[in-house]
Amino acid sequence: MTGAAKPAGRPMVLLRPVPGTSAVHRLWAGTKLIVVFAISVLMTFYPGWATIGAVAVLVFAGARIARVPRGALPSVPHWLWVLLLIGGVTAAMAGGAPVVQLGSAHLQLGGLLNFLRITALSIVLLGLGAMVSWTTNVAEIAPAVATLGRPLRWLRIPVDDWAVTLALALRAFPMLIDEFRVLYAARSLRPRPYARTRRERRRRWAREIIDLITAAITVTLRRADEMGDAITARGGVGQIVASPARPKFADAVALAIVAVTCGAALAVELTVLTTTR
């Protein structure tokens, strides 16, 4: 008898909105981009526990409102937990305040707390980006970027060209990932010659890498040609950034909620937590 097959982990699903509709789904894509940009700037200059907690609450509330299923969350591989454990132990050796006394021993938790803060910051920012991906259609991103960048046209900056490039990249990214998975699976099914020495194994791996790169370039060029024909048939690249969507009252309410939450967290970070340190 053979053992049971090991269940495959859930991959990270990005650039594909979850099915259904909600208040978060109906928000203008430009509003979500403004929120992401503002929170990113805030977390860059004030990456404290208060701001991290406030953004985490916003992400969790947005996921609940958007009814994002748990199946959309990727499974965490075991090797990542091991890396986090090693990183935490290594950071704890750096020491620093605060100091906890256990009997005659003094434990300096400064390095460990910094590591946990950076890890929490990374998770929150990844969740924020995932929320935008799960609730926004890819076709809405480029028109929103073109609308937000309209003032830059006075400076002769090609905003529309940048928006078109971004739209094509976002549309091609999931498609190319699927193609590369098919290529890798097809390559894995091919019989491999038995390698007796390390030199032969290195040569075999080099040949496989070259074959995969060549096949990937061929698939990419073919997909690019098909996408170019489709864009030409639909009226050119100008139609990509053309969209009648504009911000509404709900967008103003969402921006106000984010501004109040982040402002309160920043005030707590600069007053209460600063004085207690």
Image (cartoon, rainbow, N blue to C red):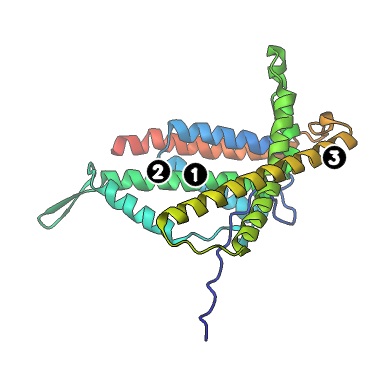
Give the camera-side residue of 233 and 55: 233
**On the image, which quarter does residue 246 sit in?**
top right
Q: Residues within 10 Å of mark 3 (few under 14, many from 20)?
A: few
Q: Mark 1 = which residue?
A: 54
Q: Quick check: 15 above or below 73? A: above
Disc 2: CA contacts within 10 A as few (<14), some (14-19) or many (>=20) = some
Inspect the image, locate mark 3, and give the three-letter code of the amino acid beneath it: Ala
Q: What residue type is labelled 2?
A: Ile
Instruction: Report whether residue 58 is seen.
Output: no
Q: Residues within 10 Å of mark 1 (few under 14, many from 20)?
A: some
Q: Is tag 2's residue or tag 1's residue first in the polypeptide sequence? A: 1
Q: In this view, does 102 lie to the left or right of 74?
A: left
What's the distance in space between the residues labelled 3 and 1, CA to CA?
A: 44 Å
Q: Is mark 2 on a helix, strand or loop?
A: helix
Residue ID for mark 3: 230
- Counting residues from the N terminus, which is met first, the one under dot 3 or under dot 2? 2
Q: Where is residue 90 in the image (x, y as percent from the top left)?
A: 28, 48
User: Which residue position is annotated with label 2?
Assistant: 118
Which residue appears farthest toward the left when viewing the image? 104
**Discs 3, 2 touching: Cβ within 8 Å:** no
Q: Which residue lies furthest to the top in this view?
A: 155
Q: Which residue is drawn at 53% across and 61% down?
A: 75
Going by the numbered disc 1, the residue's amino acid type is Ala
